[in-house]
Amino acid sequence: MNNAPLALDNDLCDKAIRADFLHFVADPDTSQQALETIEDGLLILKQGRITALGKSRDWLDQLPDGVEYFDYSGRLIMPGFFDTHTHYPQTGMIASYGTQLLDWLEKYTFPTESKFSDRELADNSAEFFCQELLRNGTTTAGVFATIHPQSVDAIFGAAQKRDMCLVSGKVMMDRNAPAFIRDSAESSYQDSVALIQRWHQKGRARYAVTPRFAPTSSEQQLEVAGQLLREFPELYLQSHVAENQDEVAWVAKLFPQRRSYLDVYDHYGLLGERSIYAHCIHLDETDRRRMSESGAAIAFCPTSNLFLGSGLFSIDETRRHDIRLGIATDVGGGTSFSILQTLNEAYKVCQLAGQSLSPTKAFYLATLGGARSMYLDAQLGNFEVGKEADFVVLDLQATPIMKRRMAQAESIEDQLFALMMLGDDRCVVATHIMGQCQYSRS
Ligand code: GUN
Ligand code: ZN
């Protein structure tokens, strides 16, 4: 990436950012040269896209007039983090005590989500949520709304204000939930079509067909979900699968003719490229093969899986089957907006399963791996020329203990590991979207 110095002019440059840089150009599982770093670098942008990255000394004294210059010397810049699965309406109910998945949905989630028929509440929550993503260095996310179309308008509206790339959609849920939070197969089709026409591929917005999970959709509604994917180009699909043992047993009762929980989705044409499935803990060999060959992605949600007592996700099985993988907070089943804290818990989940998550793999998942899992790596995920400049500026010495620990760090890998174990929102100095500073700690 340290290209031979090129002459800068106003055609190439309207912003320049000075810092240390770190990104991935490949998966560290398969390449020894996956990680690239550049000390005291300069990132050159034009209209929010990357035109060059090199040493600051090559260009600092030749920045054209009128260039906006950000001096983050001594800070570390990475591509913005990807949170591949989360729920904005659950922000206010994060950290609700005492239950596992199915009771938690009844006791906390459905009553909370029912309030999102109120557009004012939805707008207020969406604003807070987007700000919280940025405050944690997250620039792209796969986000559930609620069954209410106005809740989707609220989240895409809040993202649009900040020029953020969000994938979201209306939850489809027509059975096994209280009447106040159900739609119907017919209304979910009509509402989804209207939202797709309003939002999909408008600016950076991407629409996701969003059946909550198999137990809360009738066969007719799952058919509708498949129909939407066939009718509109490049839609996403997001849902939950194989999170909790009671849930898996329930699906087996509801769909006795299907081979497995994942097979329910597969049967209705909901497994493919741009399909993102949260959890995937209790899958079997055939399910994993189908995930891999279909191009679907797993959203690994460690804080949620621990908080709801759901089980231990297997990263080794995901590797063995070469399945696309991202990391996710799953707020409010998850307990933190911080991708750094989510990597911390991911490491511990892997430890408990007798598996390993290296710091390079962890930060790959948070950046380029996340982009690949969301099929956004052509435009995001690292600092290749031509990509969109969404990035996070990090302070590796944000707390006294981080300062002390970093002083002993022996390598960049060691620094990254300490960052993911000790870091959180306090490390985020600034978050830029398309080059623009959208959050600053100061
Ligand atoms: N399964 C179905 N709905 C949900 C949800 O809102 N959160 C989690 N963690 N799992 C689910
Ligand atoms: Zn979820």
Image (tube, grey):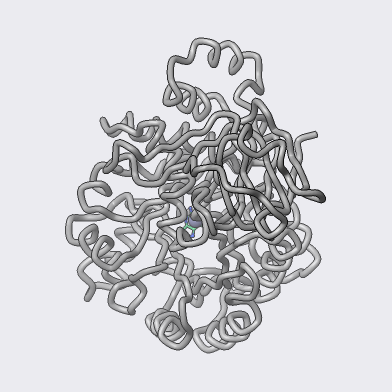
Left/right placement of residue 265 relative to residue 69 reads left
On the image, the x and y values in percent for residue 442 come to: 80, 34
- The vertical placement of 49 against 238, above or below, is above
Q: Nearer the viewer, residue 188 or 153?
A: 153
On the image, the x and y values in percent for residue 388 come to: 59, 57
Residue 340, quarter of picture:
top right
On the image, the x and y values in percent for residue 258 come to: 23, 72
| Residue 126 in sight | no
Q: Nearer the viewer, residue 201 or 24?
A: 24
Q: Nearer the viewer, residue 261 or 65?
A: 65
Residue depicted at x 56% and y 56%: 141
Left/right placement of residue 440 relative to residue 20 reads right
Residue 215, quarter of picture:
bottom left
- The vertical placement of 190 against 180, above or below, is below
On the image, the x and y values in percent for residue 359 come to: 41, 31
Residue depicted at x 57% and y 81%: 192
Q: Residue furthest left?
A: 285
Q: Nearer the viewer, residue 307 or 349?
A: 349
Left/right placement of residue 359 relative to residue 113 reads left
Residue depicted at x 43% and y 81%: 229
Residue depicted at x 26% and y 55%: 283
